[in-house]
Image: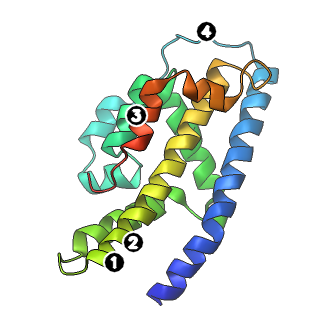
Amino acid sequence: MLIQSNTVRRRFGGVAYAMAIICIKLEAEAALTSRVSRSIGSPCSSNSQEEFSNSDEEARKMGDYRDILSLIRVLVQGPESKADVDSVIDKCAGAGHLRDDILYYSKELEKLSNDSDEHRAYLVDMGIKALRRYFFLIAFRSYLYSTSANEMEFTAWMDARPELGHLCNNLRIDR
């Protein structure tokens, strides 16, 4: 059953990721046409105190990993971008659930004994790949808040933010 579950997870994970990217872009475009643009530096609503009071398990289930929290602190409208991405991920859950994938790999790593280096490497690799997808979705949403695709490409926006490259290149699933 575990092998079948992992096969399904791998097969549909990319589909869910693609669906999430499209949904985030469409929701951003719809928001721009339906309301006046907000000031880029305006504060957004965040339940930071509530998030910190959650148990570690609940925090991880909500995608509150240390590296993701670091990301949302450096992004324009970071908490709002994460909330938007989480909403899209939940809507696309039928094709795969990215936060659940990250949690799965994180838990599997915790259960693993030190004897299985090959399996540990596999879990770390898969977990970081899922965490990186989540990272890029949140960054992409922040990009859509701060500029439009007509003004600057996402890759140029990322390149202009070296701190994002540093965070992305140093993601860890085991913390």
Q: Quick one: SS at disc 4? A: loop
Residue 96 horizontal/vertical position (percent): 60, 65
- The residue at which mark 1 appears reads as 119
Label 2 CA crowd tier, 10 Å (few <14, some 14–19, many 20+): few
- The residue at which mark 3 appears reads as 166
Q: Nearer the viewer, mark 4 or mark 1?
A: 1
Q: How far apart are the alpha carbons under marks 4 and 2?
A: 43 Å
Q: Nearer the viewer, residue 95 or 105?
A: 105
N-terminal of the two: label 4 or label 2? 4
- The residue at which mark 2 appears reads as 122
**Vertically, is 57 above or below 96?**
above
Answer yes or no: do the residues labelled 4 and 1 have beta carbons within 8 Å? Answer: no
Which image quadrant for residue 156?
top right
Which amino acid type is marked by label 1? His
Q: How far apart are the alpha carbons under marks 4 and 1?
A: 47 Å
- Relative horizontal placement of residue 24, taking residue 108 as reference (left or right): right
Which amino acid type is marked by label 4? Ser
Residue 154 horizontal/vertical position (percent): 66, 31
**Vertically, is 145 above or below 39?**
below
N-terminal of the two: label 2 or label 3? 2
Which amino acid type is marked by label 2? Tyr
Q: Which mark is residue 1?
A: none
Q: Which mark is residue 39?
A: 4
Q: Nearer the viewer, mark 4 or mark 2?
A: 2
Which amino acid type is marked by label 3? His
* Residue under the point 50% across and 23% down: 161
Q: How far apart are the alpha carbons under marks 3 and 4?
A: 27 Å
Q: How far apart are the alpha carbons under marks 2 and 3?
A: 23 Å
